[in-house]
Image (tube, rainbow, N blue to C red):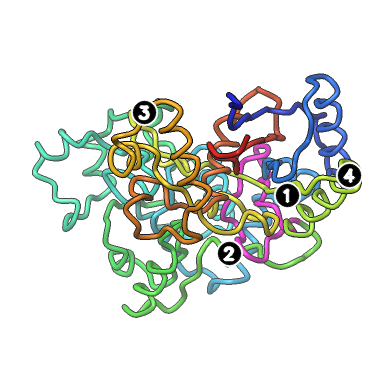
Amino acid sequence: MRTIGTEVRGIRAPIIKEGDNLVDIVVSSLLSSKEEAGYQFKDRDVVGITESIVARAQGNYISIDDIAQEIENNYSEGEALGIVFPILSRNRFSMILKGIAKSNRKLFLQLSYPRDEVGNSLMDLKDMKEQNIDPYKDTLSEKKYLELFGEYKHPFTGINYVKYYQDLVEDNQLEIILSNNPQTILEYTDQVLVADIHTRKKTKNTLKSKGAKKVLGLDDLCVEDKGRGYNPEYGLLGSNKASETELKLFPRDGERFVNDVQKKLKEITGKNIEVMIYGDGAFKDPVGKIWELADPVVSPAYTSGLNGTPNEVKLKYLADNELKDLEGEELLSAMKNEIKNKDSDLVGKGRAQGTTPRQITDLLGSLCDLVSGSGDKGTPIILIQGYFDNLSNE
């Protein structure tokens, strides 16, 4: 019996610059790793490419001045602007806030609490309860927050984000409030920018229904080609700090890129290899309670063979139920037979109970993100082999 199932390799690549032919670089990096490690490509291998090098090769960058111009173009001149539910981040929303602040208007920044949308904390839950604060009803002013929680620091970054965001905006142009009700911002202004990620549609609809005159989201800014970076689908969502004055946007035209990589790999290897772009993985840290997914999606583009969800039987379920009286080779043979003859759709079936009913790209993207990391590993390309195999494959 074959003793190795799924194998994952982080593939090193050159440092990518704007204008590089990334299709050629990805393919040549894979071929070089194959020669070094001595493995062979197979049908249904998966190649993941991190979104950052795709956007970098595209030159998909904007400046904080570009963001300021977007605000001026989309909101009434001189009107105060309310910003609702941004995440707490030094390399994501902080740069967007710097750009918004350059539009020279009064800003009201409404934070959710005790945690932001992806789990970053603004206070200790125990302290919040001791202060008899009800997050479902209570609004905290910036002054009240600092009085009660001013010494609190994020457990991973060591930052107090209320102070940090306030320091990014000059001349007392920023007022911070804490409330989990999006309507609260309408007590300050009817011009609103929705900054949450996965719940943005609901927040927009709520504000519009409650009388906000102007409601846009981060996904509505920097969506057009104006001779600089843009993303027609996600706008500023998924952006990252590139320098003190520039942000890298989420990549665009991803479908064409993954199909081009797949085509070239087919020409060279003769194998049908799936290709995806991946960003943040969709997993949650059990200590810090942070949900990793600060990008709008795990994978903005992938080849068609990665559509859908896994269709797997649960080996433990079969071993403890239908096949519980078998042992040894007889049990193994029966298990393989169950897998070979499984239904094409196991949703709701007992033998699939306990499997992971998530999108294949979310599972693979999370695996890629964990392998490549976000620091200095230098492996922006991930090769996954045997992912679609099962126990019945010899």
The answer for how far apart the CA atoms under marks 3 and 1 are is: 60 Å
Type of amino acid at the residue the image marks with label 2: Ile
Type of amino acid at the residue the image marks with label 1: Tyr
Q: Position of residue 370 (x, y in %)?
A: 55, 31
Q: Would you say the residues marked 4 and 3 are in contact, meaning their CB atoms lie under 8 Å apart?
A: no
For residue 79, side relative to residue 13 (left or right)? left
Q: Badge 3, how many Cα within 10 Å: few under 14, some, many 20+?
A: few
For residue 73, side relative to residue 189 (left or right)? right
For residue 68, side relative to residue 139 (left or right)? right
| Residue interval drawn in magenta | 229-253
Mark earlier in primary sequence (1, 4): 4
Q: Which mark is residue 327?
A: 3
Q: Position of residue 6 (x, y in %)?
A: 59, 32
Q: Which residue is mark 4?
A: 21
The answer for how far apart the CA atoms under marks 1 and 2 are is: 17 Å
Looking at the image, which residue is at 60% across and 51% down?
A: 299
Type of amino acid at the residue the image marks with label 3: Glu
Type of amino acid at the residue the image marks with label 4: Asn
Q: Position of residue 358 (x, y in %)?
A: 46, 52
Q: Would you say the residues marked 4 and 2 are in contact, meaning their CB atoms lie under 8 Å apart?
A: no
The answer for how far apart the CA atoms under marks 4 and 3 are is: 55 Å
- Could you say which is closer to the camera, residue 44 or residue 2? 2
Mark earlier in primary sequence (4, 2): 4
Q: Which residue is mark 1?
A: 61
